[in-house]
Image (tube, grey):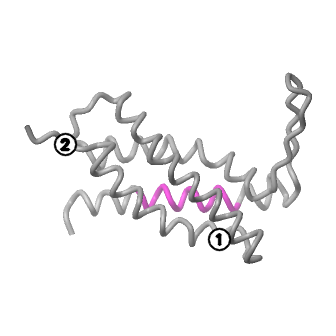
Amino acid sequence: MSKQLFRYAACGGGNMLLDWVLYFLIYNFVIGHDLVYFQLSAFHYQLCLTPHIATLCIVFPITLLTGFWLQKYVTFTASELNSWRQLGRYIVIVAVNLAINYFGLKLCVETFGWYPTPSKMVITIVTVIISYLGQKYYTFRVNNA
């Protein structure tokens, strides 16, 4: 196993554990399994989120920032791309993973009837692979010129 792959696994594993713990705590003790309503007064519209999707919306920005920081400063340190460009690319990869999470949770929880936290864990396996490849070859790629 290369040093970079080990660091990715350690940082990604730590961030994934943070994601799972936050997801469990917020879903079970903050959201409380209830629907979450947002009043969008400018549009005279009320938005309703299921508890598992509302929890995803709360946890996502936290793990986005911790994940970027860990990958930039611990794993992919050789990249010479501008930090803002890296962040933009990182957000693209994470947005793909967010879509996979969203649709995966909808499928697993609402169609298959699985519990939300184990569903999130299963979906994470898919997103880890996509994330590593995207970060290595796109977000933090090293120019070999």
Q: Secondary structure at mark 2?
A: loop
User: Percent from the top left, x then y, of residue 16?
Assistant: 50, 60
Q: Main secondary structure of the magenta part?
A: helix
Q: Give the residue at x 47% y 40%.
A: 91
Return the mark for residue 142.
2
Badge 2 amino acid: Val
**Residue occupying the point 33% across, 57% down:** 133
| Image position, residue 94 (x, y; %) | 49, 48
Q: Amino acid at mark 1?
A: Ser
* Left or right position of 136 against 98: left
Residue sitting at x 34%, y 30%: 83
Question: Would you say residue 65 sits in the magenta stretch?
Answer: no
Front residue of 10 and 128: 128
Circle count: 2
Labelled disc at residue 119: 1
Task: Mark 2 or mark 1: name the one nearer the start of the chain.
Answer: 1
Local packing at callout 1 (Cα closer than 10 Å; few below 14, some 14-19, many 20+) is some
Report the span colored magenta. Answer: 12-24
Which of 72 and 37 lies nearest the eye of the viewer?
Answer: 37
